[in-house]
Image (cartoon, grey):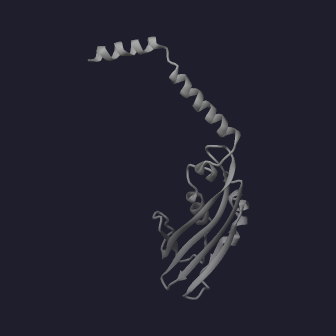
Amino acid sequence: MKDLKAFNIHYVGLKEESHLFEYQIENKFFEAFNFDEFFDANIQVALTLNKKSTMLHLLFEAKGTVNVTCDVSGENFDQEIKTTLPLIVKFGEAYNDDNEEILILPYSEFQLNVAQYIYEMIVLAVPSKRVHPKVLDGTMESEALKKLETLRVTEKKSTENVDPRWDKLKSLLTEKKT
């Protein structure tokens, strides 16, 4: 993961105050994690690290877009991302990341790689159902939506043209139940 060395924060030499780290996240970042659901990414991440004598307070803030495929129309679109992730880093005898909000690093550590936290924050910020904004407001023009509308109309017509003998058979079933 040499591509992710830029995400190492050497906190040992930092003063006890607030520090700002900024990252530009693009598709190359996700390739390092073998994640290929985004066709393009343009996300700005601001990491505020507040160093205290016994702990670190980290606040990740991400804002930007990822290009994904619409689940309804199959068209690609830019999904807006805006999310935050707070993290507290404490120091102890052994590494422990069991708690989502608290990370315990060994006293011997001198740096923290934040790439995994940025990756998880962005991936979890993308909705599980991705719908193009033009589908939601009804202005989308695509072959897939036209086909879906044709199928919906055809299905509606087929339910209207039911053979009356089936209705008689259905009434026999309901009479039998009573």
- Residue 81 left/right relative to 4: left
Is the N terminus in the top left, top right, bottom left or bottom right quadrant? bottom right
x 52%, y 72%: residue: 105
Residue 146 in which image quadrant: top right
Q: Position of residue 161 (x, y in %)?
A: 52, 19
Compared with residue 152, is residue 86 higher up or lower down, i.e. above or below?
A: below
Total label count? Answer: 0
Location of residue 18 with respect to 65 vertically, above or below: below
Q: 3 or 39: which is nearer to us?
A: 39
> Residue visible at 66% across and 52% down?
68
The residue lying toward the viewer, choosing from 158 and 103, is: 158
**Which residue is depicted at the point 65% across and 43% down?**
73
| Foreground of the two, 36 or 127 | 127
| Quadrant position of the C terminus in the picture | top left
Q: Quadrant of residue 144?
A: top right
**Relative horizontal placement of residue 115, taking residue 101 as reference (left or right):** right
Image coords of residue 154 (percent x, y) = 59, 27
Question: Can residue 130 be seen at all in this image of the molecule?
Answer: no
Q: Is residue 12 left or right of residue 39?
A: left
Residue 140 image position (x, y, % from top left): 66, 47
Q: In the rendered image, is residue 152 in sight?
A: yes
Which residue: 52% across, 73% down? 106
Taking depth in this image into account, of 82 and 19 the one nearest to the observer is: 82
| Name of the residue lying farthest toward the left | 178
